[in-house]
């Protein structure tokens, strides 16, 4: 289930990045502005993708930020 949520979120991020590139092509003029906007979009996209990937991998290993321990072991002394 977490894999489907990961893919859904990643597709949303990818769609927003594509829309940002299209908006950049439509609204910006000049090669310098295109370069600056492309770098900003690429850094944001790869940063969000890597953070999402790391959280997905952590959850798959069982040590994610949103994991819970259902079994509590106690020692008899």
Image (cartoon, rainbow, N blue to C red):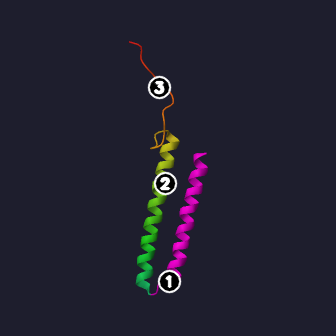
- Left or right of 40? Residue 1 is right
Question: Circle 2 sits in a helix, a strand or a loop, which is it?
Answer: helix
Residue at 50% x, 79% y is 24
Residue 21, magenta (yes or no): yes
Q: From the viewer's perspective, is residue 67 above or below residue 44?
A: above
> Residue 9 appears at what percent x and percent y?
56, 57
Please state which of the two labelled residues, at mark 3 or mark 2, is closer to the viewer. 3
Which quadrant holds the C terminus? top left
Question: Circle 1 sits in a helix, a strand or a loop, which is it?
Answer: helix
Residue at 61% x, 50% y is 4
Task: Give the mark nearer the N terminus: 2 vs 1.
Answer: 1
Task: Give the mark nearer the N terminus: 1 vs 3.
Answer: 1
Q: From the viewer's perspective, is residue 24 above or below residue 67?
A: below
Circles 3, 2 touching at the beta carbon (< 8 Å):
no
Tell me the distance, in whole angstroms, between the alpha carbons under discs 3 and 2: 29 Å
Question: Circle 3 sits in a helix, a strand or a loop, which is it?
Answer: loop
Q: Which residue is mark 1?
A: 27
Magenta span: chief secondary structure? helix
Circle 3 packing at 10 Å, graded few (<14), some (14-19), many (20+), is few
Task: Give the mark nearer the N terminus: 3 vs 2.
Answer: 2
Residue 11, magenta (yes or no): yes
């Amino acid at each position: 289930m977490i894999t489907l949520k990961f893919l859904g979120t990643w597709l949303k991020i990818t769609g927003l990045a594509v829309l940002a590139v299209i908006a950049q092509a439509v609204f910006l003029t000049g090669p310098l502005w295109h370069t600056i906007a492309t770098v900003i979009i690429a850094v944001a996209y790869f940063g969000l993708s890597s953070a999402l990937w790391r959280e997905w991998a952590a959850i798959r290993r069982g040590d994610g930020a949103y994991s819970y321990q259902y079994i509590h072991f106690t020692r008899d002394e």
